[in-house]
Amino acid sequence: MTVFAPGSAEYRQLFGVSYRLLGSSHDAEDAVQEGLARWQELSAEQQAEIREPVAWLTTVVSRISLDVLGSARARRESYTGIWLPEPVLGPAGVADLPQSRFADPEDAVSLDESLALLVAMEQLTPGERVSLILHDVFGLPFAEIAEIVGRSPDACRQLASTARRHVRAGRRFDVPGPERDRVVQAFAAACLGGDIRNLVAVLDPDVVSRADGGEHVHAARRTLVGADAVARYLLGLMSKYGAGVSAAIELVNGRSGIVMRAGDAVTGVIDLGVVDGRVAEIALVVNPEKLG
């Protein structure tokens, strides 16, 4: 009997599918667990008849995630303040998934796992999001996606194409690497140092900052734009909440980010979008329900 243990490449792939679709690690874990429960409900003979268990489970988890998307979007519309996805920390994040063995994505767009991209994808319809992610990230053929979405293969191809245009129209950020790491370190040092000039210098003039505190932590309830406004807001937060809090450069959604802790408890996570050596977008998650 095939077992898909947490931490295995197969489990990470299933989690990666659901997380990209839902933007919630809790919901993604629930979807994977429900999919695995359905696998375990099959008899040994039924499991033996499935030639590609991971492909079968990918389809099942995708259908479960698609069902969750509708209610999740409704919850986010009534969310207190700005909604941001739950960050995934550490080396077992979603960016190190194995390369898919499915059909070749003919004109796929490159999709990272940044919180900024996940926020942008909230503007897509569930069908567009599912078609784009399953095809461009995991290489599923449109014939299989059609069975999940309940549309024809040609319709799913069009959904993915429409979603791809929306994604390509957005701002593109630098990929992980030494330059990004340098900017993240400079940003962290400027925030901790409390010097507004140093912080403004590392920010893009049109930087965009979003903060998610949910119902429990006071955070800006609207998007902030502009280097001076964002710098003053961040330094104000550091002066208010910085005492006893440490900050470290760690992996956030598979790339360098900033994790803040009070003792052993994570109190905040910052994911940065970097363009041409400056911070162009900031996602700050301080909602404790998303940091457990």
Image (cartoon, helix red, strand yellow):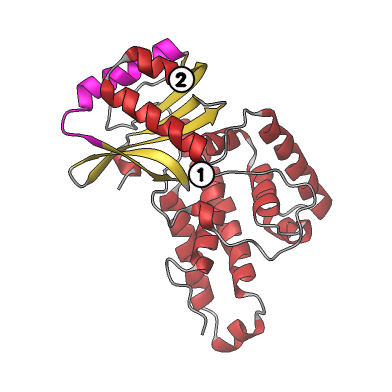
Is residue 235 found inside the magenta-colored segment of the image? yes
**Left or right, 251 with reference to 116:** left
The image's mark for residue 30 is none
Q: Residue at x 49, y 62 (%)?
A: 32
Which residue lies under the disc numbered 1? 71
Q: How far separated are the C-alphas under marks 2 and 1?
A: 36 Å
- Three-letter amino acid code of the residue under disc 1: Ser
In the rendering, at what x and y percent does residue 57 appear?
Answer: 58, 68
Secondary structure of residue under mark 1: helix
Asked if labels 1 and 2 touch by Cβ distance under 8 angstroms, the answer is no
Magenta stretch in the rendered image: 227-246
Which residue position is annotated with label 2? 203
Front residue of this view, candidates 244 and 85: 244
20 relative to 179, above or below = below
Dominant SS type (magenta): helix
Viewer-proximal residue among 266 and 81:
266
> Is residue 75 visible from the viewing direction of this image?
yes
Q: Please tell me which residue is depicted at 27% across the width and 30% down the height of the picture.
A: 217
